[in-house]
Amino acid sequence: MENEMNLSELLKELAEENQTRKILEILKESESLEEAIKKIEALLK
């Protein structure tokens, strides 16, 4: 049971890290803050 919890926690952390990387990439690629916000909002829906 403990291994399942550790795996769940690891998967959650990995998903959060991937999401953060996607957001950072969007910020770098966007030409304006408004464009970045729209893309990030779409990603988070």
Image: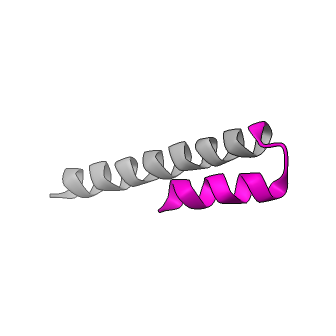
Residue 39 in magenta? yes
Q: Residue furthest right?
A: 32
Q: Main secondary structure of the magenta part?
A: helix
Question: Can you say whether 36 is above or below 29 in the image?
Answer: below
Residue 26 as seen in the image, left or right of residue 44? right
Q: Which residues are magenta?
A: 29-45
Q: Residue at x 78, y 39 (%)?
A: 28
Q: Nearer the viewer, residue 11 or 37?
A: 37
Residue 15 as seen in the image, left or right of residue 6? right
* Residue 5 at x, y percent in the picture: 26, 58
- Which quadrant holds residue 1? bottom left
Residue 30 as seen in the image, left or right of residue 3? right
Q: Residue at x 85, y 50 (%)?
A: 32
* Residue 39 at x, y percent in the picture: 63, 52
Q: Nearer the viewer, residue 31 or 9?
A: 31
Indicate how the structure is coloured in the image: one colour
Residue 32 as seen in the image, left or right of residue 37? right
* Residue 23 at x, y percent in the picture: 65, 48
Q: Nearer the viewer, residue 23 or 4?
A: 23
Q: Residue at x 75, y 53 (%)?
A: 35
Residue 42 in magenta? yes
Count of marks overlaid on the render: 0
